[in-house]
Amino acid sequence: MTTSSFDLPKIPVVDVRDGGPVRHAREGAGRALALRDDCLSWFPPGARYLVPLLDMLSKQWLARSRSPYVREVRTIAGTLGFPGVWFLNGSYQWSCTALAREENEVPWLARTLDWPFPGLGRHVEVARMRGEAGEFLNITWPGYVGVLTACAPGRFAAAINQAPMWRRTHHPWLRLYDLAANAAGTLRHVRHIPPDQLLREVFETCRDFGEAKRKLETTPVARPVIYTLAGCRPGERCVIERTEDNFLTRGRDASAANDWFDSNARWEARISSQQLLSCSFAGAAANSQARREALNGWSGSFARESFSWVSPPVLNPYTRIAAEMCPARGTLRVVGYEIMHGSDLPQPATSRREIADFATA
């Protein structure tokens, strides 16, 4: 039997303007534990015993980073009292697809968030937060301090995609070596702010598209990242491709997946976890390009065909969240996705949550 949208659970909207992610974690402790357990179910049975070690490594790195949110992570870890909090806040998305475009001269931002972990779509929440520059809506989970997808009505909306990986070698069988070497280099030497925590700082402190763009372009980050940014006026949309200390910004084709727009032989587009585990690395760049071009070529309307763009190849086995955001209108829409029994591709695991009037959300 197919579950109708009326039977699907609603995505909670939690008001944590006072207390922020610490309050979110404290009041949502049970939901945070359920999310942690669902995510761990993806790993082989013995891997859950490595979580304390992964927590320790993430804690050591984050504690040395230039992040203003380390104290929050420490407080949340102590409040929740189970391993995995540091690892969650030091991890990074596997792959995503994003597009900033204009409809009737109003910028919109659409994105999917793709991670292999089950439960991220089922447990997604919208947190109403604020900083010195104003309020914003953060698509997130209890226990997580960064920002991956958010909308600040009247200011801007933004999302993060994982950037391609720097390759020291070219042989596909040595990819795991490069992955480990990059991680070790970050742990030992890099002290910059994590990209997702920089994005939160931008939502808290930047008053408009221009300020947000400059900060995302120029602040050193701990790892390469791709930001997609949309403002409120015509022309306020761009993709910012970042390495740790440099950037390249493009506004004409404001779509992104998990490779640089101009592919580089020394950088490898992100692959699926299935490819990683099977050591099969063919087609990563082509897959990223196909997802980006499919979303960029969508000819539908956000007003009339909401989420009709969530179809293959943008929709893939690891899609967990789809979002549409229009900061000029104060609109945010989000749906959680999960793989259901007997299905090859994710299906909606929540009903569509729409906030059309932010002031009364």
Image (cartoon, rainbow, N blue to C red):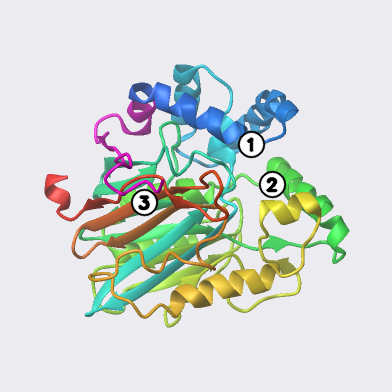
Name which residue type carries label 3.
Answer: Val
Mark 3 crowd level (few <14, some 14–19, many ≥20, 10 Å Cα): many
Tell me the SS state at disc 2.
helix
Q: Circle 1 sits in a helix, a strand or a loop, which is it?
A: helix
Q: Residue at x 67, y 71 (%)?
A: 285
Magenta residues, start to end: 1-25
Please identify, in this view, whether the residue under mark 1 or under mark 3 is nearer the observer.
3
The magenta stretch spans residue 318: no
Pick whichever, 348 or 269, lies toward us. 348
Task: Left or right? Give the position of 35 relative to 222.
Answer: left
Residue 141's image quarter? top left
Q: Sequence-wise, which precedes: disc 1 or disc 2?
A: 1
Place of residue 297 in the rendered image (x, y in percent of width and height, measured from the top left): 44, 80
Tell me the residue that label 3 is attached to.
335
Residue 203 to residue 212: above or below: above
Query: Which amino acid, by three-letter code, is at mark 2?
Result: Thr
Determine which of the numbered discs, if any, sits on residue 61 in the image: 1
Q: Position of residue 341 (x, y in %)?
A: 54, 43
Residue 17 on the magenta span = yes
